[in-house]
Amino acid sequence: MEHEISHRPSYAQLTLDLGPGESVRSEAGAMVSKSPSVDVETNAEGGIFKSISRSLFGGESFFMNTFSAPDGGQIQLAPALSGDVQHHDLDEETLYVQSSSFLASDPTVEVDTEFGGAKTFFGGEGLFLLRLEGTGPAFLSSYGAIDEHEVTSDESFVVDTGHIVAFEESLSFDVRKVGGLKSTLFSGEGLVCEFSGEGTVWTQTRSPDAFLSWLIPKIPQRNTTTTTN
């Protein structure tokens, strides 16, 4: 499976060239275009219960699409939000991904949810994280551009919870306030995640939560007042 990521980092699009017999699994609604020779099958991947778990707790669609190319073909995918796409080759390893950042993967990569404890709930990531496990290519999306940070045992790494895209299983993390009560309430930063150990963290330069906090107050509210004659 050959891939090309174009129009990055603001409006990234993933182009996959599938060889004969190859297939790719993607988030529902991610397809931009495909060759006529590429077939698509929609399933509740992993069964009903796993699909419900991903949908309710992981922020992903209930269904996933599998694109197959018996004779070879091309498909183009794009994330819902304007941003970048990151390629990651899993090699018998596990990668934890924030909700909505999964774009596509080889069907051999298992996509599931995992309970992250109460700290993930208070960190704004929900009680569950997406877990990508196995061997094969995976593609993650972001809101804004993606930065890669190497965490070493010498120094921890602190990031706003809304800017996390993914992190390796080798890292441990704790969610805490950015500072004292005043800083937490009025700095606009909220809670942060502190990673320790050795591994990689991928972050995004924009936060969907911050965008919604800016946008929602600007949306005109419907006047629900009724008048009577």
Image (cartoon, grey):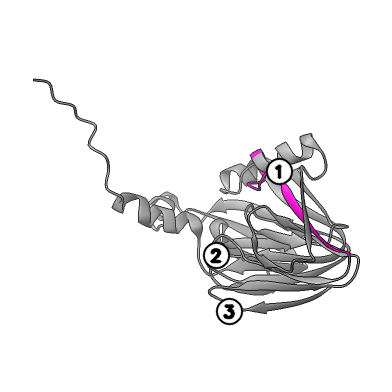
Q: In which quarter of the image is the C terminus?
A: top left
Horizontal and vertical percent position of residue 58:
67, 46
* Residue highlighted by disc 1: 54
Number of residues whose C-alpha sits closer than 10 Å to that of mark 1, classed few (under 14), some (14–19) or many (20 or more): many
> Circle 2 sits in a helix, a strand or a loop, which is it?
loop
Q: Upstream in the sequence, badge 1 or badge 3?
A: 3
Q: In this view, does 207 lie to the left or right of 50?
A: left
Residue type indicated by callout 1: Arg
> Circle 1 sits in a helix, a strand or a loop, which is it?
helix
Q: What stretch is highlighted in magenta?
A: 56-70
> Circle 3 sits in a helix, a strand or a loop, which is it?
loop
Q: Upstream in the sequence, badge 2 or badge 1?
A: 1
Foreground disc of the pair 2, 3:
3
Horizontal and vertical percent position of residue 64:
73, 50
Number of residues whose C-alpha sits closer than 10 Å to that of mark 3, classed few (under 14), some (14–19) or many (20 or more): few
Residue type indicated by callout 3: His
Q: Residue at x 73, y 61 (%)?
A: 104
Q: Which residue is drawn at 60% across and 73% down?
A: 12
Quick check: marks 2 and 3 in contact, CB under 8 Å? no
Depth order, front residue of 68/184:
68
* Residue highlighted by disc 3: 7
Q: Residue at x 37, y 57 (%)?
A: 214
Q: Which residue is drawn at 57% across and 44% down?
A: 122
* Residue highlighted by disc 2: 143
